[in-house]
């Protein structure tokens, strides 16, 4: 009897996997991020970061949670700050979303994003819960390179944070 239950469990798990919906076109856009990347991040002078700061990371980006989220993780050097981010297309609001967490306790609010097929850019913009304007643009240059910007301005228009990142596919 136990054998029959085990066979039924295995068979139903194969059936469930076969019945999983295929990735949406919106999620396939994110395929270009998958891989291991040498990432260089520059914090330009702003209210929150008064002097320029450069950091590097070997960032791993992979599909996770049923190929519905891109999981990004690494450790920014030289500070040794671990980070984890998840990116997906939220079909409920028809927008891309990113959630970011790091060892400093940083957890900015996600803002919605849209994909532009002509420019190969994902632009996320909106206001966070404090009224700050957040704009992030992620450009896919080619299969081995992408770059991003992340800018936050206060409700009064002060530049609070200005970051850019360059990602080059890591050569093993």
Image: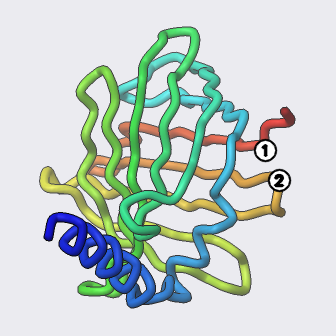
Q: Secondary structure at mark 2?
A: loop
Identify residue for label 1. 169
Frontmost residue, 116 versus 89 = 89
The crowding category of the residue bearing disc 1, from other C-alpha atoms within 10 Å (few below 14, some 14 to 19, many at least 20), is some
Residue 50, horizontal then vertical, whole percent: 45, 19
- The residue that appears at 57% across and 9% down in the rendered structure is 78
Residue 35, horizontal then vertical, whole percent: 68, 49
* 65 to the left or right of 77: left
Q: Quadrant of the N terminus?
A: bottom left
Whether residues under marks 1 and 2 lie with C-beta atoms below 8 angstroms apart, the answer is yes
Frontmost residue, 32 versus 17 = 17
Question: From the viewer's perspective, is residue 21 above or below residue 69?
Answer: below
Q: Residue furthest front?
A: 1
- The residue that appears at 34% across and 29% down in the rendered structure is 102
Residue 21, horizontal then vertical, whole percent: 42, 89
The crowding category of the residue bearing disc 2, from other C-alpha atoms within 10 Å (few below 14, some 14 to 19, many at least 20), is some
Question: From the viewer's perspective, is residue 98 above or below residue 15?
Answer: above
- The residue that appears at 55% across and 79% down in the rendered structure is 115
* 95 to the left or right of 167: left
Frontmost residue, 92 versus 156 = 92
Q: Quadrant of residue 103?
A: top left
Q: Secondary structure at mark 1?
A: strand
- For residue 144, which numbered disc appears in the image? 2
Question: From the viewer's perspective, is residue 120 above or below residue 61?
Answer: below
Please tell me which of labels 1 and 2 falls first in the chain: 2
- The residue that appears at 40% across and 75% down in the rendered structure is 89
* 5 to the left or right of 12: left
Marks 1/2: CA distance? Answer: 5 Å
- For residue 86, which numbered disc appears in the image? none
Q: Quadrant of residue 169?
A: top right
């Amino acid at each position: 009897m136990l054998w029959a239950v085990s066979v039924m469990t295995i068979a139903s798990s194969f059936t469930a996997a076969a019945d999983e919906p295929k990735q949406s076109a919106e999620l396939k856009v994110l395929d270009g991020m998958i891989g291991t990347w040498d990432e260089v991040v520059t914090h330009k002078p702003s209210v929150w970061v008064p002097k320029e700061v450069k950091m590097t990371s070997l960032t791993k980006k992979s599909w996770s949670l049923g190929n519905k989220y891109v999981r990004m993780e690494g450790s920014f050097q030289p500070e040794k700050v671990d980070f984890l981010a998840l990116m997906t297309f939220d079909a409920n609001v028809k927008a891309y979303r990113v959630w970011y967490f790091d060892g400093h306790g940083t957890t900015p609010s996600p803002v919605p994003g849209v994909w532009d097929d002509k420019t190969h850019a994902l632009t996320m913009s909106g206001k966070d819960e404090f009224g700050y304007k957040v704009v992030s643009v992620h450009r896919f240059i080619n299969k081995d390179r992408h770059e991003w910007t992340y800018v936050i301005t206060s409700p009064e228009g002060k530049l609070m944070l200005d970051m850019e990142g360059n990602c080059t596919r890591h050569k093993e």
